[in-house]
Image: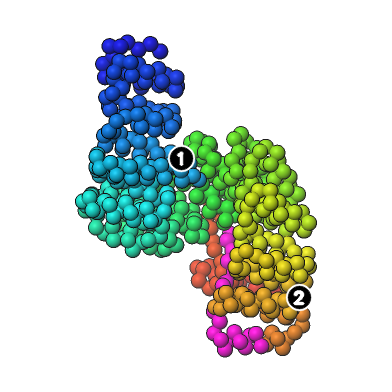
């Protein structure tokens, strides 16, 4: 590329727009330096933006910024935007977000230029990725500087507080907005859903004066995260009926709901849509497809998707391992784990949960204990409660109760319902009544109002013929007013409509016909 020393500013920008490589950028930068144009901050601004937006080269952009004496507010905004965009692209790392906050702090210390209404939202986005303490700090400085009355800053603050479940603060900011747009409504809906207040999120969503795809995604994702899978699929139908086109985020959320519901037909329809519209090329959708097919029992489909992925992420490997473990394909899950290690992918905490589950379902006690040691000593991963639960379950199923109790006593974290529930299940299998009594009492201590645990203990005693103990337990349930047992729930899909049934259900509109049919089936079986 040859550049005339007489390039005007317009021609310089035009030539820059035609650049495609870092070599082109460096050549044009050198031309600007030789011609004296580099001293102009408008030139640096264009070079910096090109380095970030077209080449994704943040270090080069930062060198340009640092070489500029007394950068103006536009250069600060461009550099902050570069850091924030890079942080959004790599959410597993806080380094870029911290870089943005350090640059914002440098701006404050220099005193000139002062932050404006465009700088504060960028600083807040970076603060959201690091911690709520930083959100509060930026909020405080914005108030002192008199910028808190700007709706764009209030909306950024609203999003920041809602991300950390501080819904009272978020709602106060929302109510104080002079003009509420779809962004502020969506931020509040997401916050309520993230805080587990999905009912409030749905009510707020229904009140939205206008919606975009991001708003629909917020409520669908919120329903999925809070276990309202049927509602998530239903809202997708409304979204399509209203003329909105689902994107990759929508597809991955609904695939998760279909996997939990076992709705393979709808999952396949979404799969077809994803590929037909080219939405399906993203890793989140591909991983969602593997998970959906696996949870629906179509392991062949899950493996086919997996084999079609050329650039497999750790999440992709984990999805397949967990699917195989879930359906008792223990040897195949272990084989995939070994294949993953051979390709140089480092396992994480999720990988070992799936692997230990596979060993548990396959009865591979020695292998499970070996992988538990491997996780800690070779990969430096501290066991979490899920890993301990798998090991206790593994040892308990094998009848090695003394080893299981040793694991519980040597745990680095406090035992919870996962641990004692796993032990209780093993006691039921091996009819270890005394140890089952210990486990159930620990569970009742953790959750005194959960009658499921007491019912499980009664079942253990009844299977052992200890009817006097069963009578005592039932009496204590009545006297101590222990909460009702959570009813079992199942789903069935008929004509693309999902029906939910609970044990003892008399609310379903066709419950009378259903019970009549069940009675007829029971009578025919007796004959």
Please state, as top left, top right, bottom left or bottom right, where the N terminus lies in the image. Answer: top left
Query: Which residue is at the front of the view, 310 or 103?
Result: 103
Place of residue 289 in the rendered image (x, y in percent of width and height, measured from the top left): 58, 45
Query: Which residue is at the front of the view, 466 or 492?
Result: 466
Instruction: Look at 77% across and 58% down and name the residue there.
Output: 365
Comes first in the chain, label 2 or label 1: 1
Q: Secondary structure at mark 2?
A: loop
Which residue in the structure is indicated by mark 2? 432
Is 215 left, or right, of 443 in this rendering? left
Which residue in the structure is indicated by mark 1? 89
Q: Is residue 163 above or below residue 408?
A: above
Magenta part of the chain: 472-493
Q: Is residue 400 above or below residue 73?
A: below
Is 171 left, or right, of 328 in this rendering? left
Q: Is residue 163 above or below residue 314?
A: below
Determine if the magenta segment contains residue 477: yes
Place of residue 226 in the rendered image (x, y in percent of width and height, measured from the top left): 48, 60
From this viewpoint, is residue 241 visible? no
Distance from Cα at disc 2 to Cα at disc 1 = 52 Å
Determine if the magenta segment contains residue 360: no
From this viewpoint, is residue 300 visible? yes
Dot 1 crowding, Cα within 10 Å, few <14, some 14–19, many 20+: few
Report which quarter residue 465 is drawn in: bottom right
Instruction: Look at 68% across and 44% down and name the residue there.
Output: 300
Dot 2 crowding, Cα within 10 Å, few <14, some 14–19, many 20+: some
Q: Secondary structure at mark 1?
A: helix
């Amino acid at each position: 590329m040859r550049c005339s020393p007489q390039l005007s500013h317009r021609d310089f920008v035009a030539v820059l727009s035609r650049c495609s490589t870092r070599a082109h950028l460096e050549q044009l930068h050198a031309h600007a330096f030789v011609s004296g144009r580099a001293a102009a901050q408008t030139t640096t601004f264009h070079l910096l933006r090109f380095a970030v937006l077209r080449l994704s080269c943040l270090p080069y952009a930062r060198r340009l910024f640092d070489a500029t004496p007394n950068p103006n507010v536009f250069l600060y905004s461009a550099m902050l935007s570069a850091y924030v965009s890079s942080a959004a692209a790599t959410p597993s790392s806080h380094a870029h977000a911290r870089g943005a906050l350090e640059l914002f702090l440098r701006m404050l210390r220099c005193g000139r230029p002062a932050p404006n209404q465009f700088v504060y939202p960028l600083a807040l986005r970076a603060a959201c990725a690091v911690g709520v303490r930083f959100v509060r700090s930026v909020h405080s400085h914005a108030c002192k500087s008199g910028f808190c009355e700007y709706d764009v800053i209030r909306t950024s603050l609203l999003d920041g507080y809602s991300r950390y479940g501080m819904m009272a603060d978020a709602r106060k900011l929302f109510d104080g907005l002079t003009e509420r747009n779809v962004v502020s409504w969506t931020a509040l809906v997401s916050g309520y859903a993230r805080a587990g207040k999905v009912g409030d999120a749905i009510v707020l969503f229904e009140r939205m004066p206008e919606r975009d795809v991001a708003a629909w995604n917020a409520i669908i994702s919120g329903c999925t995260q809070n276990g309202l899978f049927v509602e998530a699929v239903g809202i997708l139908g409304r979204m399509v009926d209203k003329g909105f086109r689902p994107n990759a985020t929508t597809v991955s959320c609904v695939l998760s709901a279909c996997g939990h519901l076992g709705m393979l037909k709808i999952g396949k329809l979404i799969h077809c849509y994803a590929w037909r519209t080219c939405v399906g090329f993203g890793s989140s959708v591909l991983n969602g497809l593997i998970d959906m097919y696996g949870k629906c029992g179509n392991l062949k489909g899950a493996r086919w998707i997996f084999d079609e992925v050329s650039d497999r992420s750790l999440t992709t490997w984990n999805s397949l391992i967990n699917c195989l473990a879930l359906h008792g394909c223990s040897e195949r899950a272990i084989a995939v784990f070994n294949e993953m290690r051979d390709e140089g992918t480092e396992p994480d905490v999720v990988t070992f949960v799936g692997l230990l589950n596979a060993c548990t379902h396959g009865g591979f006690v020695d292998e499970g204990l070996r992988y538990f040691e491997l996780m800690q000593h070779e990969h430096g991963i501290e066991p979490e409660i899920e890993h301990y639960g798998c090991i206790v379950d593994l040892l308990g199923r094998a009848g090695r109760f003394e080893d299981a109790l040793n694991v519980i006593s040597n745990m680095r974290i406090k035992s919870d319902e996962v641990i004692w529930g796993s032990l209780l299940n093993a006691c039921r299998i091996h009819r270890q009544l005394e140890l089952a009594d210990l486990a159930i009492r620990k569970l009742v201590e953790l959750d005194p109002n959960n009658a499921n645990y007491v019912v499980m203990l009664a079942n253990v005693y009844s299977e052992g013929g200890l009817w006097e103990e069963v009578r005592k337990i039932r009496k204590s349930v009545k006297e101590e007013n222990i909460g009702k047992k959570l009813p079992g729930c199942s789903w069935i899909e008929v004509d693309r409509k999902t029906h939910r049934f609970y044990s003892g259900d008399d609310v379903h509109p066709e419950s009378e016909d259903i019970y009549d049919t069940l009675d007829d089936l029971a009578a025919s079986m007796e004959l």
